[in-house]
Image (cartoon, coloured by chain):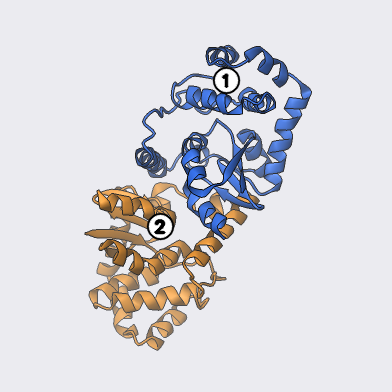
Chain colours: A blue, B orange
Amino acid sequence: MKVDFIFDVASPNAYFVHKIIPAFESKTGVIFNYIPCLLGGIMHLTNNKPPFVAFSDVESKMKYQMIEMDRFIKKHNLVNFKFNSNFPMKTVAIQRGAIAAKQLNILDAYLECIFSAVWEQNIDLANEENFFETLKKNGLNDLKIKEIISSQACKDELIKNTQNAVDKGVFGVPTFIYKDEIFFGKDHLDQLEDALKT
Amino acid sequence: MKVDFIFDVASPNAYFVHKIIPAFESKTGVIFNYIPCLLGGIMHLTNNKPPFVAFSDVESKMKYQMIEMDRFIKKHNLVNFKFNSNFPMKTVAIQRGAIAAKQLNILDAYLECIFSAVWEQNIDLANEENFFETLKKNGLNDLKIKEIISSQACKDELIKNTQNAVDKGVFGVPTFIYKDEIFFGKDHLDQLEDALKT
């Protein structure tokens, strides 16, 4: 069984899901297929707005989002999480990098590196220098990744992934697609689990 | 253990929660204290907008909301649910009626009557004639309820309930309040359950 995982490191909720995926895979026997997309592109193509924009003037709702995030953190013991002070972050290069990492067969190591940098170490990965330095420090082939993400083919693939996701009904991340059904958000993994059982 | 349940029959999600509350009470030993509020008032006081307004032009998000609703219906076997064609509905009289019913010690029967009328039988309860006729048909004291909801005390109580909820951080319905902590939405009853255990 395979679930497509539509993600962009720009979203803290993508980080949260990334952290609990191993346990979910063990429990259900399913494999998550990470599909790098661009959240900004998804938002643009669907007219959607992130909650912090759509509800920017609804103080109590914004406050609740943080409460609810804290509950998730506590429940899953994600003690290393730190909200990135550079949020919202441009992630085009990072998401192209995920496509490059897939090609180089180093996706797992790449994901660990970038999710940790953005959502544990408060690094501004939108800064190109920081980005490549972080890859290098983590033993990833920064020069090769730099070469691939400069190629038109890589740029096109990120656009294609994003458009494909939108065509399937995706309007944000994290989203899971199983048998053409979509499941949105870190709070709906239980619905995905129900679907996997049927 | 007691949980305040901030509700307005205007919301289909309030209906969904109302239907699964008995099982939740049995499982957890908690008692839900229904607090009639006015959703329109909550929205106004917090600058919040219902999803169908905030995301009216995000077609795929709107479509997903219905998919997600259908999943909830199937999971809990809520076969009698029918989306009311008069949605969104003015519920001032109905919510004042809930306050009256509390006073008359007939809240359970009143809630069964109005939730069923609005979310199972497609009745336009915003229409005063329909409202009192529906109460009468269900053996509820329509004349006494009519008398109470015309009183300033009853009107004031609905305003007070609504303001109190907002003061506690409520920005929509259904919301649950347990030990001054708020839990929003039919999808976060699991978080409430976790809190009850601690």
| Element carrying mark 2 | loop
Residue at image location 48% in from the left, 25% down from the top: A116
In the picture as drawn, the residue positioned furthest to the left comes out as: B1
| Horizontal arrangement in the rendering, residue B157 relative to residue A148 (left or right) | left
Give the farthest residue toward the right.
A152
Q: Position of residue B38 (x, y in %)?
A: 38, 61
* Three-letter amino acid code of the residue under disc 2: Val
Residue A16: horizontal and vertical position, in percent? 47, 37
Callout 1 amino acid: Ala
Q: Which mark is residue B173?
A: 2
Q: Residue B16 falls in which quadrant of the image?
A: bottom left
Residue B148 location, quadrant: bottom left
Q: Is residue B126 visible?
A: no
Which structural element holds mark 1?
loop
Give the residue drawn at x 71%, y 46%.
Answer: A167
Nearer to me, A144 or A105: A105
In the picture of the structure, the residue carrying the numbered disc 1 is: A126
